[in-house]
């Protein structure tokens, strides 16, 4: 039997020093073991502390832990850089540090203020200038950011409603990961993404440790019965996207 190559483009890893996020696991090791047991071969991630953090200390500690986890994982974990609009200088420093190490992925980011706010846009301008990918939690502003920086790939995290998918699809630099209630769980979510963006700009993502990865695998199989489309979404598209921004490869 052929083994599928599965890369998860949207995960968050817990750390023992932080109680935010999904607490099903209290530390990284059991979470990573669980993810591996689902048949996943690699994952892009932020720490929960990085993505949910509200202080400069959270930003620093969350990013530092992400780099350490990536180093220790021997290629399984690819770290996304977290930035925060209230700490611009520290964020710019982290963007540079991740870039220097070859990691060109930024996010998932949550809207601490609207993504279209000048404080976020200044940081995105730096990402665009340096050829980084930005993964944004889906809000109406994802379109604004993508339109403002047409050369920068913007990954919409989670599948929004179909009308929003259609508007996002009109922007050629927008990609989408299939995580979220409307992505892996609600019947019709992946079908909306398929019918609007098509299989070439979709990335397999689960929002683990918030969700069960196998739920998304089951839905993906139903919405994309063609093995060639599944291969694109499970790994070919993310490999292509990372190559496009000259990132260190994920696997
Ligand atoms: Zn997430």
Image (cartoon, grey):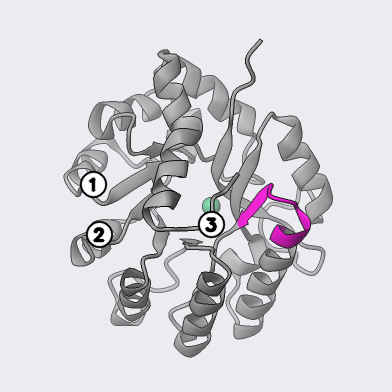
In x, y percent, where is residue 114?
34, 70
Marks 2,1: beta carbons within 8 A:
yes
In x, y percent, where is residue 7?
57, 38
Which residue, given by chain and number where applicable, does mark 2 sit on? 146
> Nearest the camera: 79 or 15?
79
- Disc 2 to disc 1, how far (Cα)? 9 Å
Q: Is residue 74 magenta?
A: yes
Point 60% across, 77% down: residue: 59
Task: Decide if ligand 1 comes within 8 Å of the CB at mark 3.
Answer: no
Q: Is residue 35 magenta?
A: no
Which type of secondary structure does the marked residue at label 1 adopt?
A: helix
Tell which circle, 2 or 3, labels the residue nearer the N-terminal end.
2
Point 83% across, 51% down: residue: 29
Establish if 116 lies above or below 2: below
- Of the 4 image quadrants, the one containing the C terminus is top right
Which residue, given by chain and number where applicable, does mark 1 sit on? 168
Q: Is residue 182 left or right of residue 28?
A: left
Q: Is residue 196 left or right of residue 248?
A: left
Which type of secondary structure does the marked residue at label 3 adopt?
A: loop
In x, y percent, where is residue 100?
54, 74
Which type of secondary structure does the marked residue at label 2 adopt?
A: helix
Marks 2,3: beta carbons within 8 A:
no
> Nearest the camera: 118 or 67?
67
Point 57% across, 64% down: residue: 51
In x, y percent, where is residue 215?
59, 27
Q: Residues within 10 Å of mark 1 (few under 14, many from 20)?
A: many
Which residue, given by chain and number where applicable, does mark 3 sit on? 248
Tell which circle, 2 or 1, labels the residue nearer the N-terminal end.
2
Q: Quadrant of residue 143?
A: bottom left
């Amino acid at each position: 039997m052929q083994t599928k190559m599965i890369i998860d483009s949207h995960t968050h890893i817990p750390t023992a020093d932080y109680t935010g996020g999904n607490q099903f696991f209290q530390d990284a090791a059991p979470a990573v073991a669980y993810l591996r047991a689902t048949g996943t071969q690699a994952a892009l991630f932020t720490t929960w502390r990085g993505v949910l953090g509200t202080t400069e200390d959270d930003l620093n500690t969350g990013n530092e832990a992400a780099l350490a986890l990536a180093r220790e994982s021997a290629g399984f974990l690819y770290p996304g850089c977290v930035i925060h609009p209230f700490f611009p200088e520290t964020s710019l420093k982290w963007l540079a540090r991740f870039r220097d190490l070859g990691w060109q992925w930024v996010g998932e980011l949550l809207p601490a203020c609207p993504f279209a706010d000048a404080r976020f846009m200044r940081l995105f301008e730096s990402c665009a200038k340096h050829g980084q990918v930005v993964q944004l939690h889906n809000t109406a502003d994802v379109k604004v950011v993508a339109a403002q920086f047409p050369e920068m790939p913007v990954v919409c995290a989670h599948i929004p409603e179909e009308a929003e998918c259609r508007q996002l699809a009109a922007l050629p630099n927008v990609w989408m990961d299939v995580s979220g209630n409307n992505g892996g769980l609600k019947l019709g979510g992946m079908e909306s993404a398929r019918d609007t963006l098509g299989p070439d700009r979709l990335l397999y993502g689960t929002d683990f440790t918030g969700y069960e990865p196998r739920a998304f695998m089951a839905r993906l199989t139903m919405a994309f019965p063609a093995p060639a489309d599944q291969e694109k979404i499970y790994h070919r598209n993310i490999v292509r996207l990372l190559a496009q921004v000259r990132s260190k490869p994920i696997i």
